[in-house]
Image (cartoon, rainbow, N blue to C red):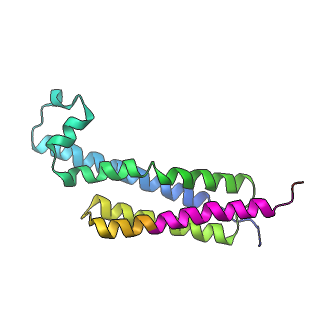
Amino acid sequence: MEIGNFELWPQILAMIALTFVVWVYMYIRRLSYILTHHVDYARLGKSSALVEMMPAEVSFPSDNLKNLFELPVIFYVISIISVQAELVDKIMVQAAWSFVALRLVHSFIHCTFNNVNLRFLFYILSSFVLWFMVVHIGVVLLAKPLL
């Protein structure tokens, strides 16, 4: 297994960028709804109040943003561990890009037309890639000499 000068920072930054884009899109959708429907701001004291009054499609980006703070957190941790322990190899680089690409498609589906079956397919594929990354780093760590 060749460990070289491979990096995971571009993939980490791509996931952060995806999260930022979803966050911006969420506020565009929410503020657009609030302004066009003249929602009384006093009714927005609880986060659930806005969700209850909005159509489901306006909440899709918010739901996706929450999802980007679930399994992707493990992606960030395993990627940073890999970089800091100098265990990044071609397999990790390819798996990380695969995870990012699958999460990008998942987010696009979730934030737009939200076909649950298709969204789940990309969710489960990205999850398999993530758990592969975790196992791969575990194997690489176990194979690494102690000193």
Q: Is residue 75 left or right of residue 63?
A: right
- Residue 68 x/y as whole percent: 43, 52
Q: Nearer the viewer, residue 97 or 129?
A: 129
Majority SS type along the magenta span: helix
User: Residue drawn 62% across and 54% down?
Assistant: 78
Quarter holding residue 91:
bottom right
Q: Is residue 43 left or right of residue 129?
A: left
Q: Is residue 107 left or right of residue 42?
A: right
Work out which residue is located at the far left of the displayed protein and give it.
Answer: 37
User: Disc count in the image?
Assistant: 0
- Residue 132 x/y as whole percent: 59, 66
* Span colored in magenta: 125-145
Q: Nearer the viewer, residue 19 or 62?
A: 62
Instruction: Please determine whether, in this image, residue 91 is positioned above or below residue 87.
Output: below
Instruction: Please determine whether, in this image, residue 49 is positioned above or below residue 10.
Output: above
- Residue 4 x/y as whole percent: 76, 67
- Residue 54 x/y as whole percent: 16, 45
Q: Nearer the viewer, residue 117 or 112?
A: 117
User: Residue drawn 64% across and 63% down?
Assistant: 135
Instruction: Please determine whether, in this image, residue 49 is positioned above or below residue 124.
Output: above
User: Residue drawn 34% across and 48% down?
Assistant: 24
Question: What quarter of the picture does the N terminus occupy?
Answer: bottom right
Q: Is residue 61 magenta?
A: no
Question: What quarter of the picture does the C terminus occupy?
Answer: bottom right
Q: Is residue 141 magenta?
A: yes
Quarter holding residue 90:
bottom right
